[in-house]
Amino acid sequence: MPSCRTLALVIRSVEVFETSLVVTLFTRELGKASALAKGARRLKSSFQGGLDLLSVSDVVVLTRGSDSLDLLTESAPIERFSAPRTSLAALYTGFHIAELLADLTDDHDPHPRLFDAARVSLRHCGDADARKRRLARFELFCLRELGLLPTLDMCTQCGREIKIVGDLVAFGLASGGVLCHECRPGVSHVVLITPEELDAIRVLSSPGDGWRSLEESSAASVAARRTIGLVLSHVMGKRPRFRPLVGV
Ligand SMILES: [Zn+2]
């Protein structure tokens, strides 16, 4: 059985049998993995308390075939995030990040940059002044890493640059981004967004610090986060459970 030592974020944990756990890990080197941690609930186990939900651990995973659970043989705590222990909004933010990783990534499909981004987001989820913008940035980064980021400059149908005609821009949830005036008729699941909102989504999805000048409570910022939520619901095939509780 091949083994892999990697950093892992614990995104789900279920008690099984008398003393064991089945944990879903989002690992840096291996991607998502569901693993049996035998005896993890015993007082003295080889996991040293390294399996707390929403914490980062150094783990060793024995990988098995696609039909069976992997086996966790070692786990040691590396980083515990303080904010989710003291703030309910931060806790829901952490649960939402875990839900995105669990639902949108595939088993054994590594995305180390997404792992790093999740870790940074969890470090900062106690920052009440910027929590919603930071979360929206993580959501857009996640979509980008997985090849699901909506197109924001070129028409998704014909590839032409979008020229804003009138007050609103057509944004196709199913077609994957903005639509030009000619291509819009006949496309389903279209929402209309303002140019300011489109700019806000562009700013939130861009690297660098530009997002800091976008006000958390401005109309464009609020609308952008709502549209990002619609995109997530579309790609997940359901409404994210914890996002409304963050008040995004
Ligand atoms: Zn077009």
Image (tube, grey):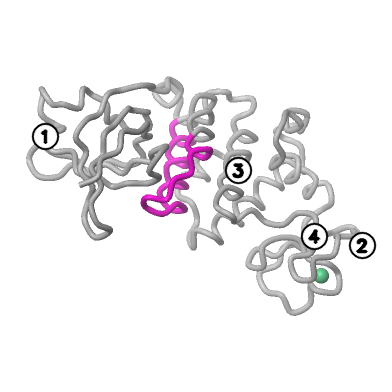
Q: Is residue 66 magenta?
A: no
| Mark nearer the viewer, 1 or 2 | 1
Disc 3 crowd rating (10 Å Cα; few below 14, some 14-19, many 20+) is many
Q: Does residue 42 appear to the left or right of 23 in the view shown?
A: left
- What distance separates the C-alpha of mark 1 from that of mark 2? 63 Å
Amino acid carrying label 4: it is Met
Crowding near pointer 1: few (<14 within 10 Å), some, many (20+)? Answer: some
User: Is label 4 in a helix, a strand or a loop?
Assistant: loop
Alpha-carbon distance for marks 4 and 3? 19 Å
Where's residue 222, x and y in %?
A: 70, 42
Q: Quadrant of ligand 1?
A: bottom right
User: The disc labelled 1 sits on which kind of residue?
Assistant: Gly
Mark 2 or mark 1, which is nearer the start of the sequence? 1
In the structure shown, which secondary structural element does the residue marked by tag 1 occupy? loop
Look at mark 2 in the image and give the residue it sits on.
165
Magenta region's main secondary structure? helix
Q: Which residue is mark 4?
A: 154
Taking the magenta stretch, the answer to whether it contains residue 92 is yes
x, y percent for residue 64:
23, 51
The residue closer to the viewer here, 241 or 82, is 82
On the image, numbered disc 3 is attached to which residue? 141
Q: Nearer the viewer, residue 107 or 236?
A: 107
The label shown at residue 39 is 1
Q: From the image, which quarter does the C terminus lie in? A: top right
Q: Earlier in the sequence, mark 3 or mark 2?
A: 3
Residue extending furthest toward the left: 18
Q: As rendered, which of 227 and 36 lies closer to the eye?
A: 36
Which numbered disc flags the more N-terminal residue, 4 or 2? 4
Q: Which residues are magenta?
A: 91-115
- Name the residue located 28 percent from the left edge and 47 percent from the top edge: 34
